Amino acid sequence: MDLSVVIPSRNEMFLKNTIDSVIANIEGDTEVIAILDGAWADPPIDDHPRVRLIHHAVAIGQRAATNEGARLSRAKFVMKLDAHCTVDKGFDVKLMADCEPDWTVVPRMYNLHAFDWKCLACENRTYQGPKPGKCEKCGSTGEFEMVMVWQPRLKRVTDFARFDAEPHFQYWMEYRKRPQAQGDIADLLCHVGAGWFMHRQRYWDIGGMDEEHGSWGQMGIEVSCKSWLSGGRQVVNKKTWYAHMFRTQPGWGFPYPQSQRQVDHAREHSRKLWFNNTWPKATRKFSWLIEHFAPVPDWPTPDPMNLTKGIVYYTDCKAKPEITEAVRRQIDKGRNGNEVVSVSLEPVNWGRNIHLPLVRGILTMFKQILAGIEASKADIIFLCEHDVLYSPSHFEFTPPNREQFFYNQNTWKVDWETGRALFYYCNQTSGLCAYREILLDHYRKRVARVEAEGYSRNMGYEPGTHQIPRGVDMRTADKWMSKVPNIDIRHSTNLTKNRWSQEEFRNKNSCLGWTEADEVPGWGVTKGRFQEILKAI
């Protein structure tokens, strides 16, 4: 099977409806594994070759039942689904199409309108809940009939949620306005726990469901924290959906009985594991998760001064030594003790060097950048090239958004031989700064895509600047201007073409702010004396 949909069920009157919905809407090689935890299904489940029923005379609990279903599965993917849900047509193939090996994927969630109570005296209908004792329209205390609706409430949609310090699940509608919440696939801090999807191997890599929590409760928080703190990612997939029936009215509670003592135990166990950083499989601290989504209501805003910065320097070792040595000395002036990872095609005695014996080229450059990002442990990374003089003010920048790429546009181009200077607004990889996590994700995808398809100009060099879907991912880019400009040294062995006139640009919007000069602000006169400037560094 491609996918096993695991449905833990205890005294669930809508289990049959849920299973029927899954079977009617699958488009892949998908099965249902339903755990009948402590009671047979009522109404009974129809025989079907894609449905397996596991019965326990004595209930084992929702977490244990979910683990059992995952153990019985031999599919590539597993999905946990509550026993009172309906699903989108083709939900299975849509989820499988967008799930990396270390992702947890949650479909967009709607509220499920499962049924109404119809008064047999006047036919007035009351929205789902406990059976009415009296008709609110005619006052009759007679018979009421359950009328199935089983449709999603399309105006009651939930894409984003969080949790507080209890920890207690909270909806997070305000998050929808953030740039990182846009697009069909977006990072998700937490979810209600009713429906989620991942690779089956991933489920066991993060330890399955922790039964020390108890039978029920904190499941969405547990899955979310494990997904992120293990080094992976959790996203909402807005391309598909499921609808969940909420039982929030008095007298209409959850099928798994749970005392306040059990609730308190589950929350205390959560606090211990996540807030105290005691989960043994964690590769990230809990503070990282809050920083990743900051600002998060009920949590303090992280201090940007606590973030670490690093430099990934990449070189093809083709530029003149006078250029590369001056560039390194200049970086040393401004890096303020931050780590340098140098990635070179020949051994270089500077920073923490990674030697890649590859042939110079576009794919090689991407591989160099990726190797440097993987080796760096910094929170924020500046990409630096071997032929750019970086102002110390360049490294003072801190990205204000964890989900965007940022380019320093205060860069002048200076000819190595003549010292002529040129400025125009542009985004260059050599001026890129971003959080390590998104750089790592981007360049892994970029290298894989170029290896598979080859490089095309539509993809571009610069993350976040090319139209979707021609780029590598859905993230966007922004810009900043350092106090003092950087100098991009143009010489005979640059990988990219030297262009000194606007006529060389097909799109004139690519050379806005065009300014030719004999000097660069903050650096002085460059014309006729640029090589002297390099020697003086």
Image (tube, rainbow, N blue to C red):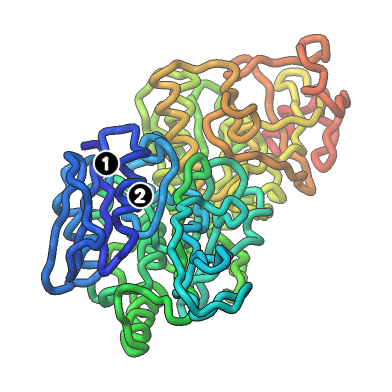
What is the crowding at mark 1: few (fewer than 14 residues within 10 Å), some, or many (at least 20)? many
Query: Residue at the location (53% across, 69% down)?
Result: 121
**Image quadrant assignment for residue 525:** top right
Kindly identify the amino acid type of the residue bearing the numbered disc 2.
Answer: Phe
Residue 3: assigned label: 1
Look at the picture and state if 453 lies above or below 223. above
Residue 203 image position (x, y, % from top left): 26, 53
Query: Residue at the location (50% across, 20% down)?
Result: 362
Residue 352 image position (x, y, % from top left): 41, 45
Look at the picture and state if 392 lies above or below 470. below
User: Element under label 1?
Assistant: strand
**Image quadrant assignment for residue 520:** top right
User: Residue under circle 2?
Assistant: 197
Alpha carbon separation for disc pair 1 and 2: 9 Å
Whether residue 209 sits left or right of residue 224 in the image: it is: left
What is the crowding at mark 2: few (fewer than 14 residues within 10 Å), some, or many (at least 20)? many
Is residue 437 or residue 78 the one in the foreground?
78
Residue 140 image position (x, y, % from top left): 55, 77
Is residue 100 or residue 291 the one in the foreground?
100
Query: Residue at the location (29% across, 45% down)?
Result: 199
Residue 163 shows in this picture: yes
The answer to whether the residues at label 1 and label 2 have Cβ atoms under 8 Å apart is yes
* Earlier residue among tags 1 and 2: 1
Residue 473 image position (x, y, % from top left): 53, 35
Kindly identify the amino acid type of the residue bearing the numbered disc 1.
Answer: Leu
